[in-house]
Image (cartoon, helix red, strand yellow):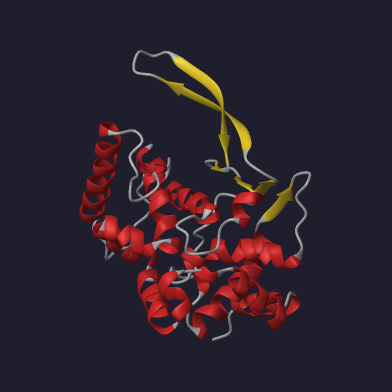
Amino acid sequence: MWSFSAWRRKRTLARYPITPQQWQAVRERLPMLDGISDEEDHWLREACILFLLDKHLTCLPRVELDDQQRLILAAQAQLPLLHLGELHWYQGFHEIILYPDDFKSPQRHRDASGIEHAWDGEHSGEAWQQGPIILAWSGVLASGGWEAYNLVIHELAHKLDMLNGDANGLPPLHSDMSIEHWASAMQHAYDDLNRQLDANPDAETAIDPYAAENPAEFFAVASEYFFSGPDLLYQAYPQVYHQLSLFYRQNPLARLNQLQAEHPAYREHPA
């Protein structure tokens, strides 16, 4: 049966092609994509085109992007959606604002006594409810490997979380997932991380201590580890890894293990 949406998608992709050389350069710049299948690679390549047409990149002074850099950003943004189906997972925002480096952002917090505190916090990224994503380009450039850091995935995980309303660490789960199992895994790990930091604020925790800020940050940090440091997340909190594998419908740890088994360079020094 003829489909207008499929026809329009095909026309759009044909109008904005990515050359093999361009895509190869992106793949070389993003080791975290190593090991994906040819079918996944094809989907990701097309998804990058559609993402860049759908989202407006606002570059502030000292940020100038060429086509390859735009694709590097898009590929990291689309990786979490690799097996989530053709749904509008990134709905609710149309703009990504790029600062050259970390930026100051006004913060407000009302304490238990009702007193409101205001200050300027330094951030590398922010995700606004029904608003834009803000990223430090320096943080985007530092992302893309297996170093358990990915600013793009972290902030877009907040957007997935916000699909249910305010960010609270509970994105819209699939029908075959259990909210109880999700909540149990996340709460146990979140409480464990906070116990460690309460006992020693300078503790070297298995995952970034920023995850202990609140459940929304825990989900965002866990998501970036899931894709960029899956071995570390699994070793620390295997049930969290399991729940994220059900949600994202991916198994980055299996990819990393296979890469380490097949490529000597990965055994001691993951890219």
Residue 221 percent coordinates (x, y): 42, 50
**Residue 55: quarter of image:** bottom right
Q: Is residue 96 above or below residue 122?
A: below
Question: Which residue appears at 47% of the width and 64% of the height?
Answer: 146
Please tell me which residue lies in front, 217 or 132.
217
* Quadrant position of the N terminus in the picture: bottom right
Percent position of residue 84, x then y: 43, 68
Left or right of residue 26: residue 215: left
- Identify which residue is drawn at 57% across, 81% down: 42
- The residue drawn where x is 24% and y is 58% is 239
* Residue 250 seen anywhere in this rendered image of the structure: no
* Residue 35, percent from left and from top: 47, 79
Task: Answer yes or no: is residue 80 visible.
Answer: yes
The vertical placement of 171 against 51, above or below, is above
Label total for image: 0
Residue at 57 percent across and 68 percent down: it is: 30
Percent coordinates x, y for residue 49 in the rendering: 66, 70
Lateral position of residue 145 relative to residue 218, left or right: right
Q: Residue furthest front?
A: 268
